[in-house]
Image (cartoon, grey):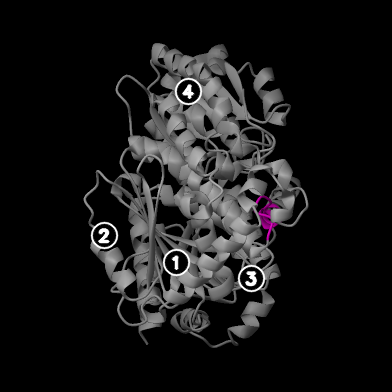
Amino acid sequence: MSSTNVASSQGKALTFSLPSDLGKAVEDAQASWDREGKTDRLWKKDASLWTNKDESKWLAWMDIIGQQLSDVATFKALAAEIQEDAFNHVLLLGMGGSSLGPEVFSMTWGKQNGFPELLVLDSTDPVQIASFRKKIDPARTLFCVSSKSGTTLEPNIYMQYFFDEAKKVVGDRVGHHFIAITDPGSKLEGVANQLKFRRVYHGNPQIGGRYSVLSDFGLVPHAAAGLDTEKLLKRAAQMEKVCRNEKSAENPGVLLGLILGTAAKQFGRDKVTLLCSKSIHDLGAWLEQLLAESTGKEGHGLIPVDLEPLVDPRGDAYGKDRVFAYIRFAGDDDTLGPKVDAIAETGQPVVRIVINDLYDLGQIFFQWEIATAVAGSVIGIDAFNQPDVEASKVVTRELTSEFENSGSLPPEQPILEGEGLQFFTDEANAKQLGGDGRTVGALIRQHLDRIHADDYFGLLAYIPMFPQYQEKLQDMRKAVLDSKKVATVLGFGPRFLHSTGQAYKGGPNSGVFLQITCDEAEDLPVPGQKYTFGVVKAAQARGDFQVLADRKRRALRVHLGKDVASGLDHLRDLVCAAVAH
């Protein structure tokens, strides 16, 4: 084992322990990076660090902190205005880069005295949307519609629904309850002006969504929730300063990126297992998108593994395809520390980062953005595009358009039906899974038997993101991890389509996926459209599956029916039995 410490100017530390072969390769990567002046080239936005295409047009996030600090009065004015209006809630309506950063703020800080509670909606599941509607009083809610392009389906239909709901309560003053965050000149900006939104905030068109947390997309919700946005930015500025250091050994962003990129490219350690302490547990959801969407393409990439149940690391429990990243808030009990130490003792590479104040999350955001850009350079891909995300959107648009024209989605034929479950897949997967005469249990076992060493297992759940459902899905992850000794991931649809879905489709073909869908216990109309939220969710699931199949992924879909709780219970039992054989 080799071990190195790197401290920032504020005493925050990046520490790591690496197997000797990986440690030597990282030292070589550092020497090469420094010799070729790549940190200087990074800050000069040299596209040749990646594929020498249009990368230089997507690096405005590197300069955003200073710009935001110079305009911090805007955020303070928003906070004062919202406090004066005595809103109970700020409901952010977004997806992916527009929602995951604000969700970290909401989950980490909670409600601030004298300010509204920040809620984040990023699901088309009608039961989940209805649960948000029940939480709020539209007359005391500020709705924040967040979409870079202004054409993203989900935020637009959320806006249609909640604008209609709010208008029923507040009448012609409904526009005063809405703000928008979008790129200049977008379709959303035009709609916001037409509907007389109280304000439109602008993003930077040269910052991609997953790098936008320190732009208005993250900071407007942060300020609206009564948090100290200036402090967050100043902490981020401290990290920006040390990430300019041309010595990689003293640059915590570059060094982290060299570790992740080298581990993946040279050693096949492309599963980044994220371990975040209790107070910052939701940070992993933001990191998932940053890593997966940035690096998962052209058959390469980092597969982030978040919230995976921990197991005894002795033996071959974790294989040789992982890097572990432990990010801890110093104010939390270090309950994970001994477990992380045990993982490191087995020879697994472990990176540790400690923050002493929650506002140091500003540092974490910027450090990992730099690291992701550097890892993308090492791997040899464009870290700023997302070609496979758009593929799913295209299929979804086709299906929703067909529903608008015909009043129904195209019919489907299950490959097997029984025990209250229906199973669907494409022709190639069906052929691999064998012929007729199978039981439900046998089909699941055949599918899971396609998992091999260095693969990962993915649960893609198009059901409400409720804790009681997540617990059952976590049971399935642990059963597969225990038996197959492979990494496991969990994504709730459709939110993961704008996040990890890029890596599942465009990254290495090492995923074995079980997509889970259901009938809607209750559905909600989308005002002005023939389709409902339930139809949109079904179209998104089908679009997701079709692109997985087009990319020749090993995928099976199970449909639960209306009783999601009992269907999940049964599916959990089947999965556990299948891997125990």
Q: Report the front residue among 573 and 103.
A: 103
Q: Is residue 391 magenta?
A: yes
Q: Nearer the viewer, mark 4 or mark 2?
A: 2
Quadrant in the rendering for residue 572:
bottom left
Q: Is residue 574 left or right of residue 435?
A: left
Position of the N terminus, as image quadrant, is bottom left
Q: CA distance from mark 4 to mark 2?
A: 40 Å
Residue annotated with mark 4: 142
What residue do we see at 55% from left, 43% from top? 244
Give the residues drawn in magenta, as a range.
381-392
Residue annotated with mark 3: 413
For the residues labelled 4 and 1, say whether their Cβ atoms are less than 8 Å apart.
no
Q: Nearer the viewer, mark 3 or mark 1?
A: 1
Dot 4 amino acid type? Leu
- Mark found first going from the N terminus, 2 or 1: 1
**Which residue is the extreme one toward the right?**
53
Q: Nearer the viewer, mark 4 or mark 1?
A: 1
Residue annotated with mark 1: 323
Dot 1 amino acid type? Val
Q: CA distance from mark 4 to mark 1?
A: 41 Å
Q: CA distance from mark 2 to mark 1?
A: 16 Å
Residue annotated with mark 2: 337
For the residues labelled 4 and 2, say whether their Cβ atoms are less than 8 Å apart.
no
Looking at the image, is 313 positioned above or below residue 126? below
